Image (cartoon, helix red, strand yellow):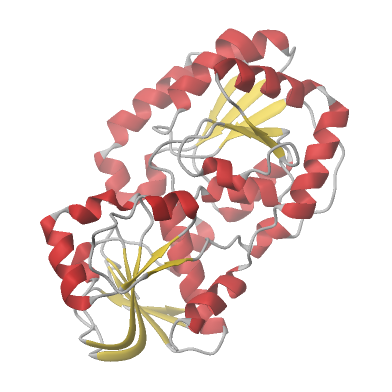
Amino acid sequence: MADDGFAFDGKIAEKGPLGGAESAFVALAEALAARGHSVTVCNRCEREVTRKGVRWAPLARDMPHTCDLYIGSRSHRVIGLVRHAKRRLFWLHNPARHLRKPRNVWRLACYRPTLVVTGAYHAQTVPWWLLHGGCETIPYGVHDRFRATAPREPPPPRAIFTSNPQRGLDWLLDLWARRIAPAVPGAELHIYGGPAVYGAFGARRASEMEAALARADGLASRGVRRFAPVGREALAAALAEARVMLYRGDAGETFCLALAEAQAMGVPAVVTSLGAVAERVDDGVSGHVAADDEDFATTAIAALLDDDLWRRWHSGALDHQGGLSWDMVAARFEALIG
């Protein structure tokens, strides 16, 4: 497996905050190792380390010449790093329209990897005319920590946002201050997010993210609370105390692991149809896909106040929204070896 993004490894994923694509990359590597495979990951990690059966090594320095399954992630630069692979995959995490750029087109035509996308919306973004080795849809898995949740009673009116602040947070803060908070006495909106999730990339975009987060600081009187990004265990604890996840979504959202984790824990969600987020919510069963701003605000208010509605959606999420385990996802990748 190879990734050309910022530096991360299994230890960072376990202890600290990490973006959805990076979390997925680590989880798949560890799940394949747990299934008995010899797994080497080459990325921008600083030194070689072995963790949970996965060997992490600096990119390019220790790339093998041959393997049964090669998974290049995101960057066109990693498509052909292993010269001889029984099966070559290119795992996409963002909308695939960028593949039309010449630097991507020629590598795809040359190496013909199978493209791996995460859902129906994601698949629709792949240019139809590209030369490649086919397209497979494999959703992200959900870590077991989020999938083993017992039913609970309705919590206080606390909403939560756990995604990239640049993905609709300004819009949500406007709607919260204008419509939702005034209608729900004592309501709080807890925001977990920031550049620390995205390593060096996050540092480059820190000013843009902080601009969105700064607005949250100015809405303390409306119950808005901002928290630093947290690791898996602390995030699960925060979700366990949340009543509803509110998220507009974004055209660049191809899966939304944040929503998948919340739904697996039984947290109802109110979203819109932007990007792939509607695929993460069972409309009317585990939450609601809003048609417009007013629908979103009205439904959010109901989810914060109506205990009967909350119980239905909570049960619906626990019963139907657990998602795939990473072992199940690893089995699907494994099956592509042939």
Q: Is residue 221 visible?
A: no
In the rendered picture of this protein, how many numbered marks are placed on residues?
0
The residue that appears at 79% across and 46% down in the rendered structure is 316
Which quadrant of the figure has residue 87?
bottom left
The residue that appears at 68% across and 17% down in the rendered structure is 298
Task: Check the image and report above or below for 81 versus 207.
Answer: below
The residue that appears at 67% across and 60% down in the rendered structure is 145
Residue most toward the front?
A: 129
Q: Is residue 232 left or right of residue 69?
A: right
Q: Is residue 271 left or right of residue 136?
A: right
Q: Quadrant of the N terminus?
A: bottom left
> Residue 128, percent across and down?
29, 57
Depth order, front residue of 256/209: 256
Q: Is residue 243 left or right of residue 21?
A: right
Which quadrant of the figure has residue 225?
top right
Q: Quadrant of the C terminus?
A: bottom left
Q: Is residue 119 visible?
A: yes
> Residue 320, percent across and down?
74, 53
Task: Check the image and report above or below for 20 versus 333.
Answer: above
> Residue 302, percent across and down?
75, 21
The residue that appears at 11% across and 57% down in the rendered structure is 102
> Residue 120, percent across and down?
48, 53
Task: Check the image and report above or below for 26 versus 155.
Answer: below
Task: Check the image and report above or below for 206 versus 53.
Answer: above
Which quadrant of the figure has residue 315?
top right
Q: Is residue 196 left or right of residue 256?
A: left
